[in-house]
Image (cartoon, rainbow, N blue to C red):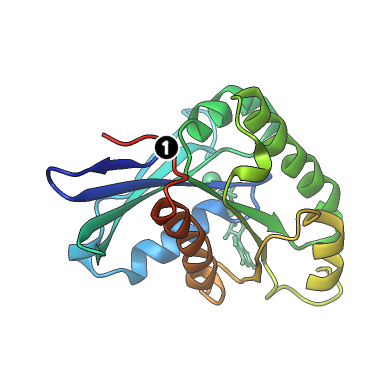
Amino acid sequence: MSLVNYATREITCKIVYYGPGRSGKTTNLHYIYGQVPEDRRGKMVSLATQTDRTLFFDFLPLDLGSISGFTTKFQLYTVPGQVYYQATRKLVLQGADGVVFVADSQARQLDENIESFQDLHANLGDQGIDPRAMPLVVQYNKQDLPPELVLPVAELSDAINFRGVPDFSADALHGPGVFETLRGISEIVLRRLSTGNAGGSR
Ligand SMILES: Nc1nc2c(ncn2[C@@H]2O[C@H](COP(=O)(O)OP(=O)(O)O)[C@@H](O)[C@H]2O)c(=O)[nH]1
Ligand SMILES: [Mg+2]
């Protein structure tokens, strides 16, 4: 839920990168972190479990500058995709203003993508949120891998993006598509804010 502070003229929006394990959510945030000037970003925080390299979640604060006279800040989060981290996913999803669904374009990951996309909608529903009202974009990541391994975007779109939301092809490892995706979700979230449909304010 976006926080609008009229006294300090600040808006803070929460964007959650959602998707199956190892689809490239953390890689998106790393790329963004590496490209954004230092004075526009805070520290990237990653919380890792002790036993493996899987991250509980990542957090990256971004300063988008002034929009309509308000200092606009975005907080980017990732969820852990693995099935057993359901509780963490629900927690991170709480209060989201927008979601980027990061799909793994590899053909063998198709079922995991679909399962995670359904998991997202179920978790939003559990939180009393109409999933169709949540700003959402889809990213087909790892499109740099050899064509025999990845599905074409049109096919992925047919299988995953049943809502027909804006979708983007990406290679988060090298950058193409990363900022297009972020811009895509930012536009929807900010448009929603300006039409007064956003969650809460204070
Ligand atoms: N080839 C390729 N590898 C990627 C891409 N994005 C992520 N990866 C790799 O996929 C693995 C999982 O990425 P990570 O960001 O940790 O996934 P997460 O679990 O969704 O956070 C890592 O080895 C990444 O380097 C991509 O666009 N192309
Ligand atoms: Mg991760």
Residue drawn at (79%, 40%) of the image: 115
Q: Quadrant of residue 190?
A: bottom left
Name the element at disc 1: loop
Q: Confirm whether residue 201 shows in the render.
A: yes
Looking at the image, residue 54 lies above or below residue 111 = above
Q: Answer whether residue 152 is visible to the viewer in this image.
A: no
Image position, residue 194 (x, y; %): 39, 56
Q: Is residue 176 left or right of residue 37?
A: right
The residue wearing badge 1 is: 1
Q: Quadrant of the C terminus?
A: top left
Question: Looking at the image, which is closer to me, 110 or 117?
Answer: 117
Q: Nearer the viewer, residue 163 or 119?
A: 163
Q: Quadrant of residue 32?
A: bottom left
Nearer-the-camera pick, 31 or 115 = 115
Against 98, residue 118 (above or below) is above
Horizontal and vertical percent position of residue 145: 72, 73
What is the quadrant of the N terminus in the image? Answer: top left
Give percent across and percent down for residue 189: 47, 54
User: Which residue is outermost to the front?
Assistant: 195
Classify residue 161 as left or right of residue 61: right
For badge 1, the amino acid type reads Met
Q: Position of residue 157 (x, y in %)?
A: 80, 64
Taking the spot 53% from the left edge, 66% from the top edge, the residue there is: 184
Q: Residue at x 81, y 68 (%)?
A: 150
Q: Residue at x 48, y 39 (%)?
A: 96
| Residue nearer the viewer, 145 or 129 | 129
